[in-house]
Amino acid sequence: MSYSLLNTIYLALAFLVLFASSELLYHKFKVKAEITRKYVHFSTGILSMLFPPLIGNHWLVLLLCGSFLIILFISLRFKKLPSINAIVRVTRGSILYPIIVYCCYLVFMYYNQFIFYYIPILILAICDPIAALVGKKFPLGKYATFGHMKTLSGSVGFFIAAMLTCTVLILGLEQIHFVQVIVVAIFISLATSFAEAISHRGYDNLTIPFSALLVLVVFKEFFIA
């Protein structure tokens, strides 16, 4: 059995254990769905970080992401996995997440550079919750996009977190001039902050990583060798 296939099996089991533990927390210990959903969201992000170093075949990543996409879709359709789906607001975030993970992995494989995977996924995992937290704690500068309220403080929090995330990752993973690092980080942070501001109902799981990928690809193809 190949190294990548074996790791894919291990990761699949880890995801199943994660879903089972969230159901246990929800049913046995009466933890609210909003909390168990965040627990799954964060843990899924951590497990997804292991794809590039552990799986060297995009078909295996497709199999993994596709399998859980089907599981999540069926759970929504038949009202299963309440630890993830039993929330008041309508959201498609859980369905979109496996799709964007696979897309980021494809781009990473094409360029053979980790930043094309880690920057989009980590900005979503880190900066999106920070924006929500800052926006709730300091609800300053309220504004509406497509009928949904956002806060300027939350958007600023997202931008700062994205800048730090991008700068640290690019400096750690690439060998480019510091000025170029800052320029790329600024453009990614602006693009992803805008995507976060206009996205609702879980679609930020798609728009935030996609906007980061778009900026990275543009800079790679036209500005940075």
Image: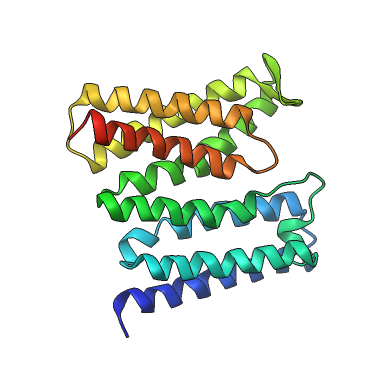
Residue 91 at what x, y percent from top left?
Answer: 71, 47
Q: Is residue 3 above or below residue 48?
A: below
Count of numbered circles on the image: 0
Q: Is residue 200 left or right of residue 111?
A: right
If the image is split into quadrants, where does the C terminus sit? top left
Residue 99 visible here: yes
| Residue at 66% over, 63% down | 72
Q: Say if residue 158 shows up in the picture.
A: no
Residue under the image location 29 percent in, 31 percent down: 219
Q: Residue placed farthest to the front in the image?
A: 222
Query: Residue at point 70% right, 17% down?
Result: 143
Q: Residue 25, how many percent across, how many down?
A: 72, 64
Q: Nearer the viewer, residue 81 or 190?
A: 190
Q: Quadrant of residue 116?
A: top left
Q: Is residue 187 left or right of residue 179?
A: right
Q: Is residue 161 left or right of residue 105?
A: right
Q: How is the image coloured?
A: rainbow
Q: Position of residue 179 (x, y in %)?
A: 23, 21
